[in-house]
Image (cartoon, rainbow, N blue to C red):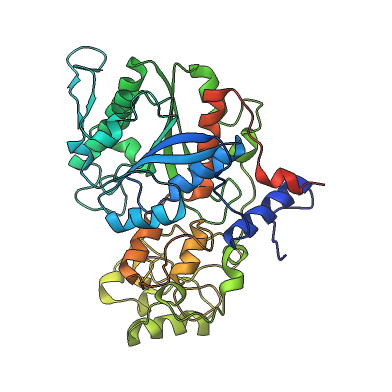
């Protein structure tokens, strides 16, 4: 197996085993669902196509359990179909989260509290009260993203972060992981602080951390904010676990490690002969094709201003736009804009084309065989870009959910690559 562990001569046997396991996982060599294991009952809100859910499933397996998704919720019904083709889903909810929980917050006093116990208005969620082992959620992040312009960090959808906390309390979920873009910490409405204080008032220990996939040994520079809450948990213990200084095995996957390069993840797909939308890059117009040729002819990775469209020549701050990936570095953050070079650094490092949806899925840590495609139906390119680009990489999801499950159970995880260490 071709494995590039981007580290020095002190790379350990465990590092090599971990690298080999993840590369095999991307190529579809490892299963992620074992019906024989006892269930871990999970709720996934704003679930998209299931990247976070897959991370939770991998984490559950490290504790000898099988993640069973009692309910998943998202406005994108086809995305939930992708999810349900890949993971065990019991119920799908397409209604707006704002319509499925009744709550009110009293902010008059020094500490915010719920005016009355939050109540679930959807039968599938109400049925899970008292039995939810884990809730994961990714409230819409467009209001916080630095790529948003005049509406950034002042978007009414930010309140969905607080609504998620209300659902957590209504369910009595034992462990909770909420994710978002790092910019959520600078929201004008202080949604993170409000959600944290509400959860603390309801008996949860709460800790948070921003994680970057490449800094944890991954192959993409994507960064995400994570809040972890544990019902009746120990505050200091949770903070030490999430920050990777607890002396437990979770420290191994939350500590900084040398990254992998992008070709480590997609090198075997360079000349894939597939002809489906999933396996092919989008056809570019004459100007963008010329720009791609220019980068390769001049052996460049950043397009000079002289070759950019007029609207990009006046000191753009997004130098990665129209850029080519570096073969010897992790991939940049994958977004829904993977179909055009004008949306980011999405040109393949060694071929004169954009990356394919399959390559983007690999970079996002979706394994071959995940349910993006069906035998009978060709998926629209725009939908694939959204399902892949909006996802939480399972690599990050697994790391944080392992921390949450360690805190709630007191048990140590057993990582799948440990079986490969001689």
Image position of 27 with respect to 421: above or below? below
Pick the residue in front: 39 or 279.
Answer: 39
Is any part of residue 397 visible from this angle? no
Kindly give the residue lying farthest to the top in the view shown: 109
Please identify the quarter of the rendering in which residue 41 is found.
top left
Image position of 329 with respect to 235: above or below? below
Q: Position of residue 355 (x, y in %)?
A: 46, 72
Image position of 387 with respect to 118: above or below? below
Q: Residue at x 42, y 67 (%)?
A: 373
Q: Is residue 405 left or right of residue 417?
A: left
Kindly give the residue lying farthest to the front in the view shown: 36
Pick the residue in front: 78 or 325.
Answer: 78
Q: Residue at x 53, y 59 (%)?
A: 367
Pick the residue in front: 110 or 18.
Answer: 18
Q: Is residue 260 left or right of residue 393?
A: right
Q: Position of residue 413 (x, y in %)?
A: 63, 34
The quadrant the N terminus occupies is: bottom right
Q: Is residue 139 left or right of residue 177?
A: left
Is any part of residue 221 visible from this angle? yes
Q: Position of residue 421 (x, y in %)?
A: 78, 46
Pick the residue in front: 339 or 305.
Answer: 339
Q: Residue at x 19, y 51 (%)?
A: 150
Q: Position of residue 42 (x, y in %)?
A: 42, 36
Q: Residue at x 36, y 23 (%)?
A: 172
Tag count in the figure? Answer: 0
């Amino acid at each position: 197996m071709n494995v590039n562990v981007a580290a020095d001569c002190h790379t350990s046997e465990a590092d090599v085993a971990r690298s080999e396991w993840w590369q095999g996982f991307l190529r579809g060599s490892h299963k992620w669902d074992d019906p024989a294991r006892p269930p871990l009952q999970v709720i996934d809100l704003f679930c998209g196509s299931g990247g976070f859910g897959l991370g939770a499933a991998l984490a559950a397996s490290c504790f000898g359990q099988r993640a069973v998704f009692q309910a998943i919720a998202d406005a994108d019904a086809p995305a939930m179909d992708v999810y349900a083709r890949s993971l065990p889903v019991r119920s799908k909810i397409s209604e707006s989260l704002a319509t499925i929980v009744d709550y009110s917050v009293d902010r008059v006093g020094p500490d915010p509290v719920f005016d009355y116990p939050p109540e679930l208005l959807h039968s599938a969620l109400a049925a899970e009260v008292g039995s939810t082992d884990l809730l994961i959620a990714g409230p819409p992040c467009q209001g916080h993203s630095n790529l948003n312009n005049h509406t950034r960090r002042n978007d009414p959808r930010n309140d969905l972060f607080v609504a998620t906390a209300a659902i957590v309390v209504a369910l009595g979920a034992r462990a909770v992981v909420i994710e978002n873009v790092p910019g959520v910490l600078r929201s004008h409405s202080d949604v993170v602080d409000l959600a944290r204080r509400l959860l603390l008032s309801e008996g949860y220990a709460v800790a948070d951390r921003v994680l970057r996939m490449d800094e944890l040994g991954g192959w993409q520079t994507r960064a995400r904010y994570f809040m972890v809450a544990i019902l009746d948990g120990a505050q200091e213990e949770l903070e030490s676990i999430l920050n990777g200084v607890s002396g437990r095995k979770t420290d191994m996957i939350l500590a900084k490690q040398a990254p992998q390069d992008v070709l480590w993840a997609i090198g075997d797909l360079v000349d894939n002969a597939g002809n489906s939308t999933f396996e092919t890059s989008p056809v570019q117009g004459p100007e963008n094709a010329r720009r791609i040729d220019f980068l390769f002819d001049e052996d460049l990775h950043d397009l000079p201003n002289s070759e950019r469209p007029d609207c990009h020549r006046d000191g753009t701050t997004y130098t990665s736009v129209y850029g080519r990936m570096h073969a010897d570095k992790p991939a940049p953050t994958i977004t829904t804009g993977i179909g055009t070079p004008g949306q980011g650094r999405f040109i393949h490092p060694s071929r004169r084309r954009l990356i394919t949806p399959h390559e983007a899925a690999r970079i996002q840590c979706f394994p071959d065989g995940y349910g993006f495609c069906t035998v009978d139906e060709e998926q629209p390119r725009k939908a694939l870009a959204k399902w892949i680009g909006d996802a939480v990489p399972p690599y990050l999801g697994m790391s944080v959910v392992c921390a949450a499950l360690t805190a709630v159970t007191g048990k140590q995880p057993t990582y799948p690559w440990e079986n490969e260490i001689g």
